[in-house]
Every structure is written in structure tokens, then in C-alpha cells.
Amino acid sequence: MQEFLNWLKTPGLTHFLIVSGILFSLGVFAVLTRRNAIMVLMGIELILNAANINFIAFSRYSTGTLDGQVIAIFVIILAAAEAAIALAIVLNIYQNFNTVNVDEFNRLRD
Amino acid sequence: MSQETLLTLSVVILFLPLLSFVLLIFFNKRLPKQGDWLGTGIAFVALALAIVVFFTKLTQFPNETIQASAEWVSFGNVPGIGQLTLDLGIMLDNMAAVMLVVVMLVSSLVHLFSIGYMHGDVRYGRYFSYLGIFTFSMLGIVITNNFWMMYVFWELVGLSSYLLIGHWFEKKSASDASKKAFIVNRVGDIGFFTGIMILYATFHTFSFDSIFGTMQSGTIPFGSETWLTAAGILIFCGAIGKSAQFPLHVWLPDAMEGPTPVSALIHAATMVAAGVYMVARTFAMMTGDALMFIAYIGAITAFIAATIAIAQNDIKKVLAYSTVSQLGYMVMGLGVGAYSAGFFHLTTHAMFKAGLFLGSGSVIHAMHHALHHAGDHHTDPQDIRNMGGLKSKMPVTYWTFLIYTLAISGVPLTSGFLSKDEILAGSLAYGSLTGHYLIPIIGFFVAGLTAFYMFRLLILTFWGEHKDHHRLEAIHESPRTMTIPLIVFAVLSFFAFYSFNPFGATDGWFMNAVPRPVSSVPATTAAAGIEEFNEALHYSHTSAMLLSLLVAGTGILVAFATYYWKKISADNIATTLAPVHKFFLNKWYFDELYQATFVKGTDGIAAAYRWFDEKIIDGIVNGTARWTKAVTLGTKNNWEEGNIGAIIYLVVSGVISIYAGWVTGNAIWPEEITVLLAIWNGLIALGVAGLTFFLFYVGVGGFDNRIVDGMVNLTAYAAGFFGLLTRKVQTGKVQTYIAWVLLGVMVFFLWFR
């Protein structure tokens, strides 16, 4: 137990990865379970941010350069762009189907 | 007028009738009166030109032979033959000039006569167009200067005679007669063609002049006199067919089925004359033996036809056989060397025979109308036994007919007397030169027969009493378009047109204009030369004339005694000599003989060929088809159908299968063998054989159906199966897909741990 507390007190790479893993799982859970498309998009944001944490953590604990941060900034930019486009799509879907429930967008199936 | 102009005019004359044919065959329905005036008009224009050419030729160039030729097709150096070119050429000598006038005269008057005779016919316009092409073909023969063109026009004559004889083709007898004429002519033409080929093989040219010229300098076919004689006789075979000589004379009497003016045309100028004209053209290449053959054929023909003619009752049949007989005379004249006389008789005969036929046409026309008027459809309008007493009703026809009859019987002051006398004198001279006295004997005998049967015809038709008084009342003279030609021919049957001496044509212009050509054959094989012949002719002339007068007089006297004064009963003689009479009446049974031999023989050969075709050829074809069927469909179905091809195929496939098994067994046979291995290898070999046999058994089609299609179907089935299987996963819910992706990623992580 003490050992665990000690490990908890001295943060290292593993801590970051655990946080990132929790964040990723929450994101995936949101993507898979939420019916609302907006919620799905928010889940995706969580997943992306989990990836950002990973990038930065690995960068910090391996070479110590700023590469991870740069990639993270890229990802944030891309995430912003993605969110804009995705929200536009959702808006259009809402205008056409009068709903944002992802279960009902199954036209492609047939 | 220059020579070129003459040739140009000749070509114009040649093509005018063709123009008439082309115009009438296409436009006769659109022209007023179906274009009869057009055809007749063109014929008369051509006649006028022919007379111009004739006079110019005989007055300005009496001794020249005007020729022109141009290369038509050059085949280059043909392997096995050498240089082969076909030349178009025309030749105008005195004989051709005379023939131009004769042909055009008869043709144009026949045109004129036909306007009346054919009035209201179903194919009136077409009839006139056929007359045009008939005339064209004959003119082509007349003015050509080479063999191949002559042969072409020769066949055209055959074709046009076929068309005209079969003019009323709805009648079975007419269509049969036209076919008979054509086929019998073909028999002779084969000989003609072979003869031309023999000449061509040696001389490599078709031109008359070149062939005779080369022959003159000593070249003869294959260096053999026999070949030369054979060539002569074979070429004469063409004349046997066209000029209706024994044994191919059978078509001419049947040709009476055509319209009567056509008979006049055929018998006088356009068809039968072609044969005689051709013999005259090729006279220079005939050896003594060939000429003797020709003379005998002519004599036999003259005799047979004359004997048949005395027993016939159909007015046109009598005339037909008299034509055959007179043609025999002409051919005999040419054969014995009386060249000019033979051609002279052709010309004079053309006039009075055309007249006789047109006269008989006039009579038949009148009889037909009278019978039609009386509503009688059973009495034959052509049977002379139904006639008699027509003299008073048809004066023009009667008087002209009388003149023709006198001419053909050889009574002095007529043209027929001159020409026949010359031929008889020639045959007598031939007899004295060669000892073949049979020819003049036949000649004189036939002269008597001719006089007899012609006067029999005249008396029975025009004199005596008509059986039916009412019918006689209904008979009228024919219209003027029909009587004018009769008068023209009657006038031309007088001696003065041919020689001013009524008892000898030797000094007349005609005999001098057409002298006998110098023979081109080697002296050893040639017949008696011109001087020798003329000397013999000189001695025989007077006796021939007296004899011919005597026999002709006797013939006429007997005819009068039998049919006019009734001193001799014809019926009694016919009963006493029943077999002979029957023999003559049935035309020596030639038709029956040919029917039994050639026609039946041909039928037999045809039946044999048919059997061969149906059983053997068709069997091979069908067998191939069945074999293919077996190959494609396999043997299974075909075996049940009893398909021979399938059975053969089955046997072959069995053999191949066993061979395949054997080869496989050998290939896998190890050096050391155990029982188990032997069984195992045997099974593999059997399997290969079985598989091979199975492939054969199902056939190519079976292979396709079962194996190829099977694989294709299997692919499709598999695709469908997996499609159905994976379809269930495709829910259309994005989140499910993502769950699957996640699962997949996790699997990958686990896998590549």
C-alpha cells in the first residue's frame, strides 16, 4: 500500500498515461453510448485530448524536446476544424431529419 | 463512201435491233401501241442501211474484204496457254453484205407482219423486243470476224429463239418446245466449242483470217490431218444443231409452237441460216473428209425430212420439215463444194420460206378467226384436212403462196429453180469426181418429194372443196400489214433478182459476188479444187437441169393426180403401205428414240447422282453434324437416338480413355512393386481413364455445362453466401461500427502485444 502511495506521490510517465487512458475510455464510452450527435462529437474531443496528453507525455519523458507540444497544437487546430465541420454536418442533418439522433441516420444501410 | 464508213454503218445496223430490244423490253408498257411501231421502224431503218451497205459494197469494193478489229480484253501471258487476248472485230465481205440484207429484210417484214398477226397478244410489247434481240444476235454472227464472237452471238441466237419459241409459255407444249430447242442446240454447241478450242490450241487466235492464213502456210492442229478433219467436223456440229441437221433436227418442227412469224424468222433468216452461214464462213478449213461428212449429213437430212413432210397434216409441220429438208440441201451443197450454190440457196430459200410461213400464218389467222366466229374450239386451225377452197376467199395469200410453192419446188423462172439446180449440178459433179453417187441420187429424189409435198399442201389448203360451207363464208383475207410482206417475198422469189438468165445462175451477180474461197488445208487432204470442180460442174450442168425439171414435174404431177384429180387414192396407198406411212407420220420415231435413250438415260444418270448426293454426300454432311453434336452434347442422349456419329464417337472416346489410363499407369509404375502399390496404381490409372471417359461422355458441352459453369456458379454462390452472412453485421448504426472498430483495435493490440 505504501509502495502504491509512494508511486502516487512521485508522478512519472505512467501517471500521465493513466489519465490519458481514462480520458480516452470516457471519450469512447461517450461516442458509443450517446444517441445525440453533439455528445458523440464531444466524446471525440475527449479522445483527441487523450491523444494530446500522450504526445506531450511521451515527448517530455523521452527526448525532452518540444516535438510533442507542437503535434498537440496541430491536433488542437485540427480538432477545432473538425468540430466546425462536424457541427455544420450535424446542423444540416438536423435541418433534413429534424433530429440529431445518430440511430436514425441509417439511410446508407439500405 | 469509204471503207470505214461502210464498217461504221454495219456496226450501226448491228446495234439498231439491240436498241429496239432495250427500248421495248423496258418501256413497252408506256409506249403507245406497246411500241410495235418503234420496233418495226427501227427494223426498217436498219434494212435501209443494210441495202445501202450492200449496194456500196458490191459496186465499190466488190473484191475486198473490209475488216476492223480492236483488242477487247488482254489476259496477258496465261500459264499453259500463252498470250491470250480477245479481239472484237467485224468483217464485211460480199457474203456478209448479202446476209445483212437478207436478215434485215426478213426481220423487218416479220415485224410488219406481226403487227397484224400478234394483235391483242398478252405479251405484245415483249414479243417485239424479243424480235429485236433475235435480229441483233443473227447480225452479230453475220458480221463478226472471229470464232469467239461468233460463238457468243451463236448462243445469243439460241437464247432468243428459246424466248420466242416459248412466247406462249403457258402452253406446256410451247415451253417444252423452247426447252427442247435450247437443249438440242446445246448438244451441237458443245461440238462447236470443242472445235474452236482445237483450233485455238494450235493457232492461239480466234480470227478467221489469221487461222486460215496460218493454215495456208502449212500449220495444222497438232500437226495431224486427222485433228484438222476432227476440228472441221466438230465445228460443223454447231451447224448440225443450229441448222437442224440429222440427227439434231428434232427441235425445229417442235419450234412451231412459237408464233408463226417467229417460225418464219427462225426458218428463213435468223437461226437455221446461222448454221449454214457458219459452215460457209469456215469452208476454207474443211478437209475433203470433213466436207464429205457434211455432204452426207446434208443429204440424209434432206431425205429424212422430205419423207416425213409428205405424211404430215399440220400446215406448219409440213413447212417445218420442208425447211429441214432444204437446209439439208444447203449443207449438202456446201459439202459437195458447190459453195456459192449452197449460200445462194440459203438466200433464195430465206425469201420463199419466210413467205411460206407468213402465208401459212395468214391462213391460220383466217381459220382461227373463222373457227372463233363459229364458236368452234375443237377443230384444229392448222390441220390442212380442215382447209380447202381458200383460194377464192384469200386471193393475195393464195397467189403469193402459189409463187413460193413453185419456187421451192424448183419450177423454172423462180429463184428456187436457180439455186436448187446449182446445188444438184454440184452434187452430180461431186458424184462424178469422187464416185459418191448416192448424194446426187438422194438430191434428185428429194427434189421430187419436195415438189410433191408442197403441191399436196397447196392443193389441200387452197383448192378443192371446203368441208364446212358456213366456215368458208367467215374466212377473210388478212389485213394489209400481213399481205404486204407476202407480196414483197413473192416478188423476191423471181429469178430476175439473182440472175438475168432464168436457166443458169452461174453468170448472175450473186454467184460471182460470193465465189468459193480457196481451201486453206494441205493439198493432200483438200477436196477437189475449184477448177477441177468447175469443169465437172460444166459437164453435169445440163443433165442436172433436165433431171431436176423431170423429177420436179413428176412430183407436181403425182400431187395433182392424187389430191386434185383423185386418180390415185392417197388413203389406199396409206393403207397398203401402212407401216411405211406410220413410220413417216411418226417422224421416223426420232423423238421416241431420243426419249428412250438420251432422255431416259439422262434421267437414269440424274437419279444415280441424286442417290449419291442424298445418301453419300448428305450422309457425310449429316454424319459430320451428328459427330459434332456428339462431341458437344456428349454421347448420352445421342446413344439413345441411335445416332451413328455418337456411336463412332463413343468407341473412339473409349479407346482414348483406355490409352490415357495406360499412359498414366506407365508413368507412375515404380521399379519395385508391392501388391498394395499395384492396386493403388491400378486405381489411379482407372481413375484417369474414368475421368477421361467421363469428359468424353459429357462432351464439350457437358464439360462446359458441368465443370466451367459449375465453377462460375460456385463463385457466385460463395459470394452470395458470405454476403448474406456479413449482411447481418451491417446494422446501419454508426456506433455499432465504431464498437466493432474498437474491438478490432483491441484484438490487434492483443495480437501484436
Image (spheres, rainbow, N blue to C red):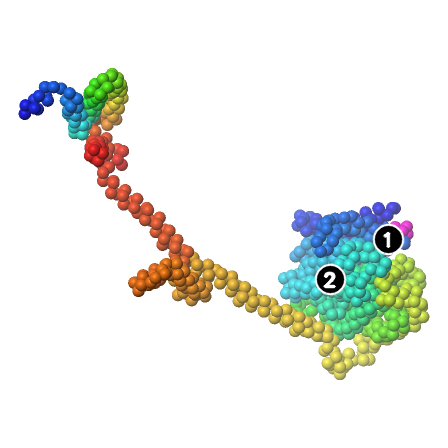
Callout 1: helix, strand or loop? loop
Q: Position of residue B423 (x, y in %)?
A: 86, 67
According to the picture, the residue beneath numbered tag 1 turns out to be B65
Q: Which mark is residue B194?
A: 2
Neighbour tally class for label 2: few under 14, some 14-19, many 20 plus, Cα within 10 Å:
some
Neighbour tally class for label 1: few under 14, some 14-19, many 20 plus, Cα within 10 Å:
some
Q: Position of residue B413 (x, y in %)?
A: 90, 65
Horizontal side of residue B747 vs B128, given as left or right: left
Residue at 72% x, 58% y is: B155
Which chain is mark 1 on? B
* Residue type at tag 2: Thr
Q: Nearer the viewer, residue B310 or A97?
A: A97
Q: Position of residue B404 (x, y in %)?
A: 83, 65
* Residue type at tag 1: Thr
Q: Quadrant of residue B705?
A: bottom left
**Can residue B383 be seen in this snapshot?**
yes
Magenta segment, prevailing SS (helix, strand or loop): helix
Name which of mark 1 and mark 2 comes first in the sequence.
Answer: 1
Horizontal side of residue B615 vs B73, given as left or right: left
Bounds of the magenta segment: B54-61
